[in-house]
Amino acid sequence: MNVRKRGIGKRLTELHRWNGWIVVVLAATGLLLAWEPVRGWLQGYFRNPVKQLHIVLGIMSGILLAFYLPLLPKHLKQIRRRPKQKANLIFVLALLAGWLISGIVLWQIRSFPPAWANGALLVHDLFTWIGGPYLVYHSIARLKWMRRPERRAIRVEEETEEAGSGGGRSPYGEPVPLIHRRQFLKWTAGAAIAAVALPSFVRWLASSGGGGMGLPGVEGMAGSPGADANRMLPPPTPLPDSANVIGGGAQGHFRMYTVTRLPTFDSDTWSFRIFGLVDRPAEWNWGQFLALARTVQVSDFHCVTGWSVYGNTWEGVPLAAVLEAAGVKPSAKYVKFYSGDGTYTDALTLEQARMDDILLALMHDGKPIHRDYGGPVRLIVPKMYAYKSVKWLSAIELIDSEHIGYWEERGYDTNAWVKG
Ligand SMILES: Nc1nc2c(c(=O)[nH]1)N[C@H]1C(S)=C(S)[C@@H](COP(=O)(O)O)O[C@H]1N2
Ligand SMILES: [Mo]
């Protein structure tokens, strides 16, 4: 045993231990952030602190990686005769680097075009699906009781990572049985982890991110009417442009977000109103709302967490026309939007609200907007991140002072402009 080797070994062990714990907390916080059911009503005020913690830990892991890199050549030399260990090391380093780089893009999402964020989210999720189960397995396999005492002795001496296993020869030269108790435990653990993770992973792959981390998500905008659907009669009749679905239809999947239980609406009780600092406050029932002039527009939809749906054909009532008809008083400075879920709100400055592409949308790709995605009427603000696009829109109020929206109150940026 030589002294220099031992020094680097100690440092490696320290770095490994710190990084291991950081990755454990990163996994826990990451799961909380990505898991749709937790995202909304369980988290509320916790979402942003959890996100901040996740980011800080990610940076710490990056710093540890920076400390490690100068040791990498020596480390590789040290394990040059242990192919399994080498493969493990390269795999883990690639994982960490992928998480780090994609994480930085997602953290600084406003500085990047949406396509970058989409790619970063895909990498972040994919690496989590592959790396998460692997690291759980890796930690179980490293548990002391999984090791034979003589291996532990070698460990202390060389202070290296995960030793190779399986048939062949032990470092002492004695033959090792093909299936060892430890090996059996490892396989069992590996199989159990795979059995838990695989079905969700397959679902995630199939929907290419459609349901967050593969957990409950809803496919398709226009679901079949049932107990879970709105009952809006008559349904809106699409304009020709909308019925033809300009450009062949939307690309991508919406992740269904809500901060409340999903509300359901009925044309008999549904209403929509504009009030506050306007000359002519108004209220519409479903039939009256259907009679308002609509336009068709194609736009991209970007969530600030990194996913997008491109080329949506939206049909709806232009907000600018509704504001115009209501007669905005000179004292009005902001437009506040209320969701029929009773909780979610957001706001725009009057100037922003007058952009001509903002719609009170009723149809997506030629079909009524499904209740899960904000139907019968949702706001669409194409130039801003989708947290501005209030689902189940039920009222608009003209106000003279700033209103802080639901997610903005919980740490989202009031600047929601999408770059580019
Ligand atoms: N009422 C309501 N509107 C909402 C939200 C919500 O939770 N409740 N989430 C916002 C966010 S952050 C996004 S990304 C989009 C998601 O729309 P979707 O559920 O149709 O995919 O809705 C926005 N509008
Ligand atoms: Mo979002």
Image (tube, rainbow, N blue to C red):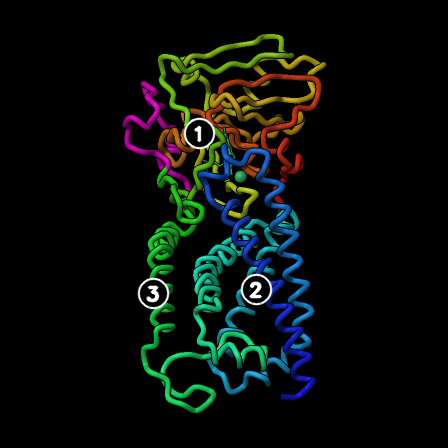
The secondary structure making up most of the magenta span is loop
Depth check, mark 2 against mark 3: the one in front is: 3
Q: Give the amino acid type for the residue marked by disc 1 in the picture.
A: Gly
Q: Label 2: which residue?
A: 96
> Is residue 312 in sight in this rendering?
no
How many angstroms separate mark 1 from mark 2 (CA)? 37 Å
Would you place residue 181 above or below residue 285 in this image?
Answer: below
Label 1 to label 3, Cα distance in Å? 45 Å
Q: Which residue is mark 3?
A: 188
Query: Residue 386 at x, y = what percent?
Result: 54, 37
Residue at point 59% right, 85% down? Answer: 77
First in residue order: circle 1 vs circle 3: 3
Residue 374 bears which disc, if any? 1
Mark 1–mark 2 CB contact (< 8 Å): no
The residues colored magenta run: 221-246
Given contact means CB atoms under 8 Å apart, are the residues at marks 1 and 3 in contact?
A: no
